[in-house]
Image (cartoon, rainbow, N blue to C red):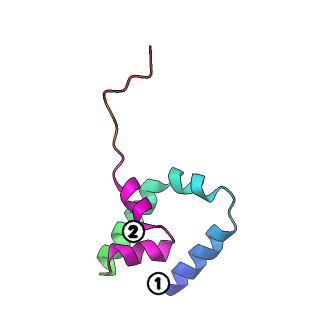
């Protein structure tokens, strides 16, 4: 796990627009955090730390809510 953490952090550190990439792949990242915590039997907080994601970000992107009342088309 430590090797995976260090490799991931080094890759992300050199990527421009990393926030846009996180948003684009938020489903994959949240799924990975769920799997890491389940398989590794560690807390979600630790799994988030391994991937360099804050817990707030994880919980915000874990479930994408769609508002059905908003209509953008006039």
Left/right placement of residue 2 relative to residue 9 reads left
Magenta-tinted stretch: 43-64
What residue is drawn where x is 31% and y is 27%?
A: 69
What residue is drawn where x is 40% and y is 54%?
A: 61
- Total marks shown come to 2
- State which quadrant residue 72 falls in: top left
Mark 2, Cα crowd under 10 Å, few <14 / some 14-19 / many 20+, is many
- Asked if 4 appears above or below 72 in the picture, the reply is below
Query: Disc 2 on helix, strand or loop?
Result: helix
Left/right placement of residue 35 relative to residue 25 reads left
For marks 1 and 2 on the same chain, the one whose residue lies earlier in the sequence: 1
Q: Main secondary structure of the magenta part?
A: helix
Q: Is residue 59 magenta?
A: yes
Across and down, in percent, residue 25 comes to 50, 54
Mark 1, Cα crowd under 10 Å, few <14 / some 14-19 / many 20+, is few
Q: Residue furthest top?
A: 74
Q: Is residue 68 magenta?
A: no
Residues 7 and 47: in front is 47
- Asked if 13 appears above or below 40 in the picture, the reply is above
Across and down, in percent, residue 19 comes to 58, 56
- State which quadrant residue 9 falls in: bottom right
Report how far apart the C-alphas of labels 1 and 2 lie in the structure: 13 Å
| Mark number, residue 31 | none
What residue is drawn where x is 46% and y is 67%?
A: 54
- Asked if 12 appears above or below 46 in the picture, the reply is above
- Which residue is under mark 2? 33
Q: Residue furthest bottom?
A: 2
Across and down, in percent, residue 74 comes to 44, 13
Query: Disc 1 on helix, strand or loop?
Result: loop
- Which residue is under mark 1? 1
Left/right placement of residue 13 relative to residue 1 reads right
Across and down, in percent, residue 4 comes to 52, 80
């Amino acid at each position: 796990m430590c090797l995976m953490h260090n490799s991931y952090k080094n890759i992300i550190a050199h990527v421009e627009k990393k926030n846009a990439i996180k948003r684009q792949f938020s489903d994959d990242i949240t799924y990975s955090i769920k799997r890491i915590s389940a398989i590794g039997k560690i807390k979600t907080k630790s799994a988030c730390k391994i991937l360099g994601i804050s817990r707030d970000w994880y919980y915000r992107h874990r479930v994408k809510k769609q508002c059905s009342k908003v209509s953008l088309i006039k």
